[in-house]
Amino acid sequence: MTLKLYNDLTRRKEPFEPQEPGKVTFYSCGPTVYDYFHIGNARPFIIFDALRRYMEAKGLQVIYVQNFTDIDDKMINRASQLGISVSELADKYIKAYFEDADALGIRRPTHTPRATHYIPEIIDLVRRLAEKGHAYVIDGDVYFDVMSFPAYGKLAKQSLDDLLSGARVEVDSRKRHPLDFVLWKSRKEGEPFWESPWGQGRPGWHIECSAMSMKLLGETIDIHAGGSDLVFPHHENEVAQAEAATGKPFVKYWIHNGYILLDQEKMSKSLGNFLTAREARERYSSLAIRLFMLGAHYRSPISFSDDSLRQAESGASRIQNCYFELQSAPADDGSEKNKDDILLLEGALDRFNSALDDDFNTAGAIGILFDVVRTVNHATSGGRTVSRPFREKALSFFKYANEILGLTEAEKPSASLQIPGEEVEQMIASREEARKNRDFNRADSIRDELAAMGIVLEDTPHGTRWKRS
RNA sequence: GGCGGCAUAGCCAAGUGGUAAGGCAGAGGACUGCAAAUCCUUUAUCCCCGGUUCGAAUCCGGGUGCCGCCUCCA
């Protein structure tokens, strides 16, 4: 089975073939750390992390880089508003990023470079461009000369004229071409700066990704990912900078995710219609947020709504309940039992992988996961015992699916319980005693008491279980 | 103006030529002291019009509606 990915460079689904067999170089655009990230930002973090995990599950060695943009206009403005330094601001929100990302089950990338830690590499790249005649200097600002790079527009599939005709921004008349973009900005009063051949200043936005990608992953990488709003100008400019400097292809596969809509509009910081991941986590479980994100194809836009998240919450519980039931279900050696179910599970694994191989169709894969949930629930319903081979097979399916999608294990830490587990067990025992004596009033009041503490009871043929509500 | 995306049951959402996955919600039944969880049953002809084809949600043409990029933006 071969993974196919939709490549925005060619606008086609293509078989994924890394330059070096078995090894993948993967760069994903990370956040500008001037604020908490919102759930629209969270989509690529979750999706591309899952893609990375799938590749690793297929046995590929993935070097996965996600950067932090820690110097730009927004950073500077925010820092001055708060009266702190830009690097303090960055430290604060990088820490917050990891708190939120960890909680959302996003694995740590191989590298998480910060732009300000790669100033020498950035300067070097700008110098290379200047030497090759792709950049020019005006008053200490260095611009990329788009007309010197004939392929400009190849990712956005737009000519210079096309791009220009829709321009909504007034142009700096000093530039040779209106689309020329800044590689290095001269120092302004009160702003952080670094020494450079063009005087004191700081890097432009686009250059950092090219520089860090080339430094950490090489001059040509396999995958570069990000939100579709980055196609132009950010990624287009990255291509121009990198390829003009090296003369080599910068990226083999460009992949972009669709955005999240809120009230029919793209969720974005500038529109102000956003919900931070941090706020979302207070309202919904991480599992539900992940199911919401992964439950649609990554290139489709999805609408965020309370209703959708509640639906995801229910679905996530269904998966969780099933997995829980499976782990505690009694198994025996019955060799004939569940034979058909085992075949179903084997077929499900193939279909699961096929879905993911088809442009990482997580929604399809989740459909298969739910099929497995039904098969398992069916086999264990009514407290039936299952065969040991069936249970092993089912458990390994869950383990595998979870390795990629992270839809089962990321439970809230039990530390959030207001009551120790032993005490819960004692109360359950008292309730059992009461039920045995048919004192249902007492039994129900114990159950209510636990419910008030966020604990739900489930009576099964094997005894009473509890879980957090 | 250029480039691109989307339109599938009450809701969310797969499926891109062979007679519509899955989830949520709802209804009926089973299990239960009652619940919860779970199981069984049940709910669509795929925005509209035309075309290609033995056959289309799936291809082509034309509409309608919504969204996005061309400025910072995941």
Image: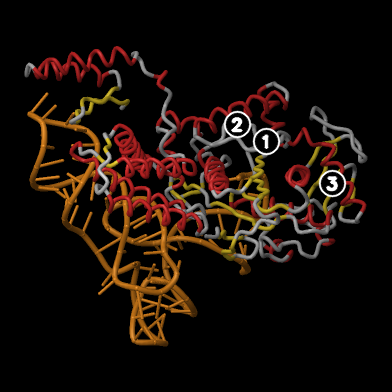
Q: Which residue is mark 1?
A: A112
Q: In the image, what residue type sits under mark 1?
A: Thr
Tell me which numbered mark, 3 or 2, is placed earlier along the sequence.
Answer: 2
Q: In the image, what residue type sits under mark 2?
A: Asp
Between residues A262 and A194, which one lies in front from this camera angle? A194
| Residue A418 visible here | yes
Tell me which numbered mark, 3 or 1, is placed earlier along the sequence.
Answer: 1
Q: Which mark is residue A125?
A: 3
Q: Please state the chain letter of the residue tagged with numbered disc 2 in the rendered image.
A: A
How many marks the image carries: the answer is 3
Q: Identify whether A9 is placed above or below A348.
A: below
Quick one: label 1, few (<14), some, or many (20+) residues within 10 Å? some
Q: Residue at x 14, y 15 (%)?
A: A433
Q: Which mark is residue A20?
A: none
Answer with the quarter of the image where residue A98 lies. Answer: top right
Q: Identify whether A340 is placed above or below A307.
A: below
Between residues A469 and A428, which one lies in front from this camera angle? A428
Q: Please state the chain letter of the residue tagged with numbered disc 3 in the rendered image.
A: A
Q: Which residue is mark 2?
A: A35
Q: Is residue A38 left or right of residue A341?
A: right
Q: Measure the C-alpha gap from mark 3 to mark 2.
A: 29 Å
Q: In the image, what residue type sits under mark 3?
A: Leu
| Residue A168 visible here | no
Query: Is label 3 in a helix, a strand or a loop?
Result: helix
Quick one: label 2, few (<14), some, or many (20+) residues within 10 Å? some
Q: Measure the C-alpha gap from mark 3 to mark 1.
A: 20 Å
Same subunit, labels 3 and 2: the answer reads yes
Q: Residue at x 57, y 59 (%)?
A: A5
